[in-house]
Image: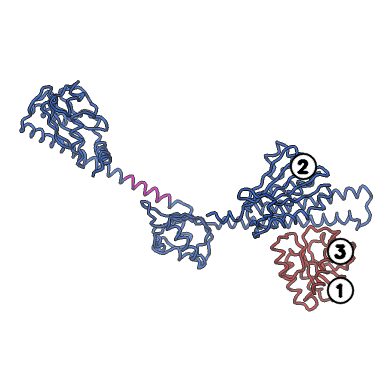
Amino acid sequence: MPATLDHILFVEDDPDIQAVAQLALEAVGGFRVTVCQSGREALAIAEQANPDLILLDVMMPEMDGPGTLANLRKLATTATTPVIFMTAKVQPHEVAQFRALGALDVIAKPFDPMTLADTIRDRWAAHQASL
Amino acid sequence: MPDMHNDEQRRQAALDRLCLVDSSRDPRFDRIARLAQQLLKTPIALISFVDRDRVWFKSRIGIDTEQVARDQSFCGAVVGRNAPLVVADSHEDANFRMSTLVQGEPFIRAYAGYPIHSATNYAIGTLCVIDRRPRRFRSYQLEQLHELAALLEDEITNLDISQILREHHRIERELKHERDFALQLMQAMGQGLAVIDLQRRFVYINPAYAALTGLATEAIIGRTPFDFAPPHERERMSQAGQRVDQGESYTRESVIMHRDGTRIPVLLSVTPHLRNGEVIGAITVVTDLRERKRIEQLKNDFVATVSHELRTPLTSIHGALGLLVGGVAGELPGKAQHMASIALKNSERLGRLIDDILDIEKIESGRSLFQFQFQQLGPLLEQAIEAHRSYANRFGVHLELRLPSDGQIPAVWIDPDRFLQVLANLISNATKFSPIGERVVIELIHHSGVQRVQVSDQGPGIPQEFQQRIFQKFAQADASTTRRQGGTGLGLSISRAIVEQLGGQIGFETNQHGTTFYVDLPDPLNKTAEP
């Protein structure tokens, strides 16, 4: 597992949020970002993309965030890849549920684009330290 | 010993039932009175009825007076002793010598009277003859008077029995009407109604209750509520049943199992069924909660949807503006930078508004789950102050904590996160309205049975006209403060909603030198002492 965070797979169905988050992660955070429209698409390219971290929207049509996570865990490449959820419906007991599913953390929408990259880097670092 | 008071009441009731007092003259009665006058050869003969405090004459031969006072009267004495009275010369009789009826009109010297009884054997009046001269009545004359009295009694008994029968019929009819009415009410009720006996068997149910079980009424009578309760409810039901047997009432949510297996959420209001003060069972009113639960669910779903649907576009707006202002998409010209900053600031405010509206909706509807625990107040206050230190510095305000001098900092039963939310609101309000360089004091005080946490500022005080609506939603003293102070106008109403859920009270004291907001939290020791 790489010790530095470089490549993020971002799964989000809203194209505007895709554009904003991609710019925030690339321009502010200096990450490489692969964007997917849906959980299905993420599963299709996950093996090939082999990301360091996956940023996953919770509410998506067809396959939602938790469903996508469960399927990603079945793939060899992403079986243990750290995952962070993004959601507009963040409530304390939901955060606990998402953590129980194996997510590092939950980022609430709307997020601050200028600090998004730092937040993700902090979670990543904390996760690396715990390994 | 007979109860004199009750006896007189029953005697009076027997008389009242006959409706004779103050009735018009009746030839049947007058004939008997006239016969008595002729047989005993007296100037006066009377048929009297002894009413509460008077003697009223139904028939009066030889006299015009309609009534005399019961006190000191001869007829009153006959009824009082329930025995015949014969006085040959009242001037020689110690009991009557001083009576007003002897000393004045009608100047009674001689008197002979027999009691008249109701069908229920109460002395209600007399048949009597009166002379203004002394005289010795012959025994055959008294015998004749007695016979006439018996005749009169027969007359009254007939009257009495028909009255009693009429009364019985009336009461029966009324009871039937009342029964029918009660039955109709119970049948018409939308709520379920069930009456059980002490063996917990249904003795009455209404159609609404039967509908909840999906069974016919006949199939339910004789069974027990346990038959329609899911297993986990039965223990609670039996405990609650024992409380009702001891005369207690209660209301609680429960579940009824429908014949088709559906579990119907219901509200039970159970009261003891009393007869002559004895518990003989229980009366249960059952409210179907399905519709209420469905609406709650709809509202939950709606709030969740709204929150998602509002926040999604806001995420793009806020994110795009944040990147623009942050220069990530390239340097903006000065005016454009200023405009983008305004838009960003307001998108943040809109975000807070959405959060607050959803928050207060959830707290007020009781759908926000509070995580209660025993919590030391001291560390919580320190934590709240620490979190606001840099915020206060920006306003040039100093935050100060004061704990009780006795060093006693008790634990309270609260949700710490929610209480921190209240403290955050009170501290940021106090900070915003403080003059630069002043202090905001956060203080813990023991206050008769409650723990009081108060936040005091040295600001300008709350304007009089605003004090009434300070806890209302979107209440701010004037529109310009909203903009300047950057609040949503919901902080205090959220705080109040939270404090109420915590079982406490929030309030304030204010004057032109400053304002103190306080939260009184119930002392957990006191709370356990409550029944």
| Residue B180 is a magenta residue | yes
Residue B94 found in image quarter: top left
**Image spot of residue B489 (x, y percent):** 73, 46
- Asked whether the viewer can see residue B494, the reply is no
- Is label 2 in a helix, a strand or a loop? loop
Q: Residue at x 70, y 36 (%)?
A: B465
Colouring convention used in this rendered image of the protein = by chain
The residue labelled by disc 2 is B458
Of residues A110 and B208, the one drawn nearer to the viewer in this rendering? A110
Whether label 2 touches label 1, CB < 8 Å: no
Of residues A17 and B203, the one drawn nearer to the viewer in this rendering? B203
Name the mark on residue A3.
1
The boundaries of the magenta stretch are B173-185
- Is label 1 in a helix, a strand or a loop? loop
Q: Mark 1 or mark 3, which is nearer the start of the sequence?
A: 1
Question: Between tags 3 and 1, which lies in front?
Answer: 1
Question: Between tags 2 and 1, which lies in front?
Answer: 2
- The answer for which chain carries disc 2 is B
